Amino acid sequence: MFSTAGAALIRAAAYPSGMALPAWPDLTSDQPEQWREWLTTAWALPGFAVAVAGATPQLAEQIIQAVTGEPVSLHRLRRVVESAVRYLLRWTTRATPFGTFAGVAPVEFGARASVRWGEAHHEVPRPDGQFVADHTARAEQDLALLRDVAVVTNSLGYRRGDRWVLPCARSDGDRRWDVEIRLTGPIQAALDAATSPLRFAELAARIAGATLTEVDVTERLLASLVRAGVLLSALRPAMTVTDPATYLARHLALPDPGDRVAVDLRIGASVTLPPAVLREAGRAASTLAAVAPPHPGWAEYHTAFIERWGPGAAVPVHDVLNVLGFPAGYRGSTRRVPAVFTTRDRLLAQLAQQSALNDCAEIALDDELIGRLRSDDRPLMPHTELRFTLAAATPRDLDRGAFTLTVVSGSRHAGAASGRFLHLLTSAELASWQQVYQRLPTVLPGAHVTQLSGPPLDAHLTPLARTPELLPVLPVGDFHPDPPYTVADLAVTGDGQRLWLVSRTIGRPIEPLLLNSVLLPGLQQPLLRFLTEIWTAWSAPCSRFDWGHAHGLPYLPRVRHGRSVLHPARWAIDRSAFPRTAPWPEWRDTWQRHRDRHRIPGEVLVGDDDVRLRLDLDDDAHLAVLRTHLARHVRTILTEAPGPAGWIGGRPAELLLTLTAAPPAASQPRPVRAVSALRHRPGQSPWLEARVYGRPDDILADLARQPTNILPAGWWFLRYPDPEPHLRLRIPQHRVGRSTDTAGNLARWAQRLEHDGVLHDYTLHTYRPETRHGTGPALAAAEAVFAADSRTALRRLTGDRQAATAATMITIADGFTSDGPRWLTEHVPHRSGPRLNPTQLDLARIPHRDDDLTTALATYRRLAHTDGLDLDHVLADLLHLHHARMIGVDTASERHCLRLARAVARTHRETT
């Protein structure tokens, strides 16, 4: 279960305490004089004019024109008034930090809740991201500046044939495309030399000397690579630099940015949260994680990786991406995962419809329903952030648990939502946060937690992505003078359950954090997203409640667990539901009928995510704002508003709490091995791989009946489920060059089975030995075990397949360790479940003797030990592969067979 990590922020609206709002203007008819009067009063509210001018200078100018009596058309005046109404609502009803409308402050923890609101807010201006990008580019065009700074090869780039590719480096609106540069000798030499930061002048001299080129010519070439982003210079402020203007000013004079400035606000608030709130937040986050669906694209990617390289192989990141591309759903990915209507989707659709039919506004989650919504047994993500509101009358109510917690969102990991505000902390506060992050638990034992540093795709978004350096940095498309981790050092590896990153230098798992909330799918470099998700995709995330395929329904009820609202009630309204040009009375009557029919409450939030306004649907001015919103959007989302926050004086406020979960006891991840370049291609190769598609059991039964000369001795097989059920036959060619004879025999055999309706396709493929099984003599011994195990499987495909599999698992464990019952008892996890079938247990107890298999196992164990393999992992692989031969890839069945084998082994140990 999640608990507080000791770090939190409050986000709150920053309007002055005690401010009296004027009555809202009448927007139901044309009343220009009243509108001007209202604008004058609203514009005089303390701080409102400054906030609007900072957010949209154009609107501020238009309001000033209206209040000073300048001529303004009626249509334009209405638009100005409606905009001012929306900004006043934004100021007084929304906690999302934006300019001086709202800000943040750190939160303390104590035995009792306390709130002190001060007016001494602190503004921190930062130049617009495009302003910084423009002047960085100007600095990089100055050769005199460039000569004195270091440059490094951009880690986003990679080689494709005779080209160097820089992904997503050019744009036109929302369209982005790669930049490709022909790899000439000098360019290749420069990229190789600058894998670590090197002074531009030194690099130019080195390349000029190596290519017998004039230095000035080389300098111009290198400068062009800097302008293209192929080389990164130290003139570029890294994303861990939170004051880029000051950084740039060390190198060149910057002009006044004018209105190209954004403001972050540190509010003068002091808030202490009591234990009751922290416990409830931990329960809410744990519940959200328990019912979160798995990531759809990563399971397919995991299968593709394991099929290509096998468990335990450490493959450089760029090599993986060159072969597999990015997972489904990534920018530029060609991989596709079919949309599946799961059991979870069906249950949620039933719950939503039943709520609508029963006029029920709420679904209460209990343990039984949570269990039905849980789709797997993934462990909790070890850290996260929960963003929520609290509805309570007084701070004392927070102490005694008399509050409602409404979840706003969750984070993929700690720091994703809070990172961009940490530059507002004092040095002591930041040091405290850094200690929290340095103690974060990890998914894998012994993993190193790192901080990704890389710019988003759009330069305008860089202020939202800058974060102080809290952890050792892993730069991605960012200049750092001496980073402890690099993309070039990272490899992807995996086992039967997950993929993760590993440092090839130190051999430890790496878990990178991207400490900003810029959207991963569309606004970040795909590589940044990949490095963020590859290790988080296998844990249950604390994310916003996911309705799955039901998310598009016009009505979704509230979802509650205990004192927490995990998902407020929500209504989706199509533009066509209301007459766009009807007079106000007619439109209002139509709206009222719609509201009554759909039971929409009096106070709602209109909009999505952080771009929402709180509206009072009993106020005509607010209704007019809603009408305009409905007319501008094809689909409008209304969400029930949270209850009043009397505990903080009714001010809109959200808490952002960092949470951690103790990771489950886990063994060290399997040792990784560099991926082998060995490939056996059909033709001139000592191995041939054939894939046969059809009915695997019938195909194997036919193979078992064939004379031994149909395939050379030493062949073996595995079952595979994707892209459809098939068998892979790995066949040794004892005389290289005779593969055509074997292929001919296979083709004739396949033709007969196709005629019999057993097989429908047959192909030849490259066989890639998996280095997890060893190399050289150890690999040959492993292949001898696979052949012996395949012969065993062919003889045991009748009767109770699971009992036979369990019995042979005991034989394999005994042959590999000489004490199989002990190994199975100590290494196979004890799993609870339904009582084992006594008949099946009796069948599993029947010993299976196979001298060939036992001899092969003993030889393999000796050579695997010599080859430095982890023998426990090797035996676990052999048991998994035996199940794959007997039954196939079926996690539930494999666990059941291991449970049977463990039960038999335990009984054996107790009776001997």
Image (cartoon, rainbow, N blue to C red):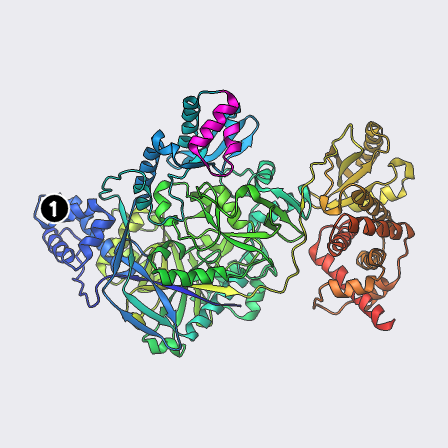
Q: Is 568 contained in the magenta span?
A: no
Q: In which image quadrant can residue 142 be found?
A: top left
> What kind of secondary structure does the magenta stretch mostly adopt?
helix
Nearest the viewer among 463 and 67 is 463
Q: In which image quadrant can residue 824 be found?
A: bottom right
Nearest the viewer among 219 and 547 is 219
- On the image, the x and y values in percent for residue 415 come to 44, 57
Query: Is 422 situated above or below 274?
Result: above
Q: Is residue 757 visible?
A: no
- On the image, the x and y values in percent for residue 725 come to 72, 44
In the image, the segment drawn in magenta is 189-212
Nearest the viewer among 678 and 901 is 678
Q: Is 205 contained in the magenta span?
A: yes
Residue of label 1: 65
Q: Is residue 526 left or right of residue 309?
A: left
Q: Residue at x 80, y 68 (%)?
A: 906
Q: Is residue 488 left or right of residue 5?
A: right
Q: Amino acid at mark 1?
A: Gln
Q: Residue at x 20, y 68 (%)?
A: 18
Q: Residue at x 9, y 52 (%)?
A: 33
- On the image, the x and y values in percent for residue 158 come to 53, 34
- On the image, the x and y values in percent for residue 874 come to 75, 52
Quadrant holding the C terminus: bottom right
Nearest the viewer among 827 and 560 is 827
Q: Residues within 10 Å of mark 1 (few under 14, many from 20)?
A: some
Query: What element does badge 1 sit on?
Result: helix
